[in-house]
Amino acid sequence: MPALVIGYGNPLRADDGVGWVAAQQLAEELPDVRVQVLACHQLTPDLAEPLSRASCAIFIDARARGTPGQIDWQVITTPADSTPTSTHHLTPAAVLAYARHLYQRTPTSTIVVTVSGATFDYSDSLSPAVAAALPQLTGLVKDLLNRCPAADARPVHAAPRPSMLHYNC
């Protein structure tokens, strides 16, 4: 099963689009056999299906707090008894709950990587601080993918063609 990277956010709201931009860059750099890369505006229940097939998953998003360009990550889990309740504004943990509820399977490891934004105004460009953090962000995601449980043992390197899917979410 391939690893799954989901970059999400609004690419027309400046730094909120960092997940989208990172997904585009990663799709150009990662082998499409080992990693499926999705870019979407928001998390939706239909992401539960590809999530249920993934060996590990990494979500990439912006956040409004912190020093602009600061990158953090955390492992998330879904309690065994969790049942999804709302579809209006989903979190990565809620999408995991949908995967468990609908497909009885979640990835071995799920990580959320966030980048602190400087501006969320209308713009299709990242702020200088977030744009400068992009190489570190994509490097971190590649490093996390290399440590992905149950993934192919080959390290993640550049690939000749992208594996990007723009999900209708």
Image (cartoon, grey):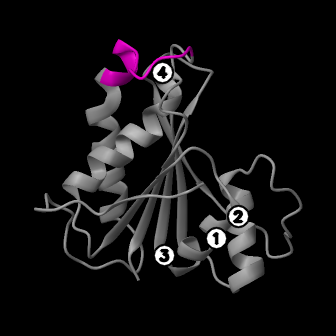
Residue type at mark 3? Answer: Ala
Q: Are marks 3 and 2 in contact (CB under 8 Å)?
A: no
Residue 41: image x %, image y %?
Answer: 57, 44
Which one is closest to the eye, mark 1 or mark 3? 1
Residue type at mark 2? Answer: Pro
Magenta stretch bounds: 121-131
Residue depicted at 77% across the width and 46% down the height? 89
Q: Residues within 10 Å of mark 2 (few under 14, many from 20)?
A: some
Residue 8: image x %, image y %?
Answer: 53, 45
Q: Along the polypeptide, which appears first: circle 1 or circle 3? A: 1
In this rendering, position of residue 72 left or right of residue 82: left
User: Could you say which disc has been placed on residue 14 in the image?
Assistant: 4
Residue type at mark 4? Answer: Ala
Residue 56 shows in the view = yes
Quickly name the residue at label 3: 54
- How many angstroms separate mark 4 from mark 2 (CA)? 25 Å
